[in-house]
Image (cartoon, rainbow, N blue to C red):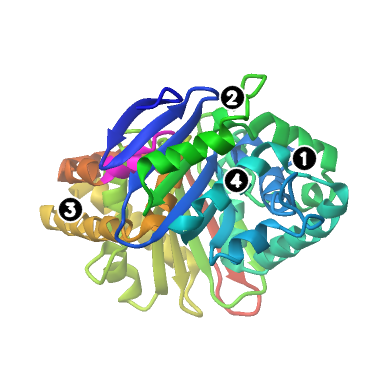
Amino acid sequence: MREDFESVRESAGIKEYRLTKNDLTVLFMEDHSAPVVTLMVTYRVGSRNEAVGHTGSTHLLEHLMFKGSTNYNKDNGNTIWKVLQDVGSVLNATTWFDRTNYFELLPSEHLEKAIAIEADRMRNAFLRDEDRQPEMTVVRNEFERGENEPFEVLDKHVWATAYQAHPYHHATIGWRSDIENVSTERLRQFYDTFYWPNNATVSIIGGVEEETALDLVMKHFGSIGKSPHQIPEMYTTEPIQEGQRRVVLRRTGEVPIVGVAHKSPHGRHDDTYPLQVLSSILKSGKNSRFYKSIIDKGLASDVSVWAHALHDDGLFITYAFLTPGTATDLVEKTIWEEYDRIKEEGVTKQEVERAKAKIRAETAFSRDGSYSIASHLNEAIALGDWTFYTTYLERVEEVKTEDVQRVSRAYLGEDTSTVGHFIPTHTDAGEG
């Protein structure tokens, strides 16, 4: 192993290295099944690191960091998009609560182009006011599109109601007034605070030799110093909830929606795995609990259950998309009855085994291609441990029927719930 890198650990064929000069984390997996490679840079910064006045900064920076950097810009005739699309690359970026990621999927022989671009914009992005103004308009339009989607609006209000102190209260896209008014200087301060090698992970997955990949990382990222300051820790915790919270939205829409949310533990907690199994038991397939009790009875066209595994406490949320004319109170009552049944009677071994089989299939699919692997690693990095991805199935297989009942009793209480109803104003649907 070359002296520029320290070998840290290996799991399921993925190797972790630390670039000793600047503490950049590198994840590498060699796979020559196709002549392509995925490069993904994950910054451990998201809306979790924002506050009132600059909510949405991570997302706005995501847009601005495509507008040019010292070596890749319009004046030089080699914009990021042109250089990468000219070699057949698929590229983009995404932002969420705990992370931002920039990625390229491209032919293996052009990996250096992507690495050079990501290294350059890590510290040399222009972030100019003349770029912020038009990009602010683009982001605001994105915000407004979301405001026209009843489910997105309800989900945003459920999170904002469930979390009052913790910054998961803020949607990743931010609040409109912050999007419109945050200054370029404030965005630059945010960039200079978080966008450093020691707050990032470079994942390289695909058809490239390990030595070649590490040489390219060293060549382009090795000259960047680590941050001259400590990366700020987000230390705000959510106070204990001591009673049910409710939010009702009445506005134009097609069908009523009911959401029932409960705070769940951080993603690295042991209870994450039985909650994932519980989620599958409730929602997956025609044998699932909610299919039988809600969809089969014509009360809803779809029921989704998310067990969000995040860096901090997440939400376990059930959303039911009702059939026209169905009362939201009726469906909420049905959701609670199913929760109570599981708390009192538990689940069957057959249900747990069926859920595990479903999760096994989903996990196998998540390893189909270099981009899929890098993308799942990205989420695991965000919650605080990339091996969450490689050990996930093993931990799920350990879940027993009594674990599912235990976590339902521990987390699905009425006093710790947040309930949301979306009631279309142009239908006869109501709460009664």
Q: Residue at x 31, y 65 (%)?
A: 290
Q: Does 84 sit above or below residue 310?
A: below
Image coordinates of residue 24 in percent, x first then y, are: 51, 30
Q: Is residue 389 magenta?
A: yes
Q: Is residue 179 magenta?
A: no
Q: Nearer the viewer, mark 1 or mark 3?
A: 1
- Disc nearer the start of the sequence (3/4): 4
Label 4 with label 1: CB-CB less than 8 Å: no
Give the left or right position of residue 202, taking residue 232 as reference. left
In this figure, which residue is indicated by the disc labeled 3?
A: 352
What secondary structure is found at the residue carrying circle 3? helix
Q: Nearer the viewer, mark 2 or mark 1?
A: 1
In this figure, which residue is indicated by the disc labeled 1?
A: 187
Q: Is residue 310 visible?
A: no
Query: Are there few (<14), some (14-19), or many (20+) residues within 10 Å of tag 4?
Result: some
Position of the N terminus by quadrant: top left
- Disc nearer the start of the sequence (4/1): 4
Image coordinates of residue 54 in percent, x first then y, are: 75, 40
Q: Which residues are magenta?
A: 383-392
In this figure, which residue is indicated by the disc labeled 4?
A: 116
Query: Are there few (<14), some (14-19), or many (20+) residues within 10 Å of tag 3?
Result: many
Q: Callout 4, which amino acid?
A: Ala
In this figure, which residue is indicated by the disc labeled 2?
A: 233
Q: Nearer the viewer, mark 3 or mark 4?
A: 4
What secondary structure is found at the residue carrying circle 1? helix
Q: Quadrant of residue 168?
A: top right
Q: Which is nearer the eye, 5 or 102?
A: 5
- Disc nearer the start of the sequence (1/3): 1
Q: Callout 2, which amino acid?
A: Glu
Task: State how far apart marks 3 and 4 are (Cα).
Answer: 47 Å
Q: Callout 3, which amino acid?
A: Val
Task: State how far apart marks 2 and 1 are (Cα).
Answer: 18 Å
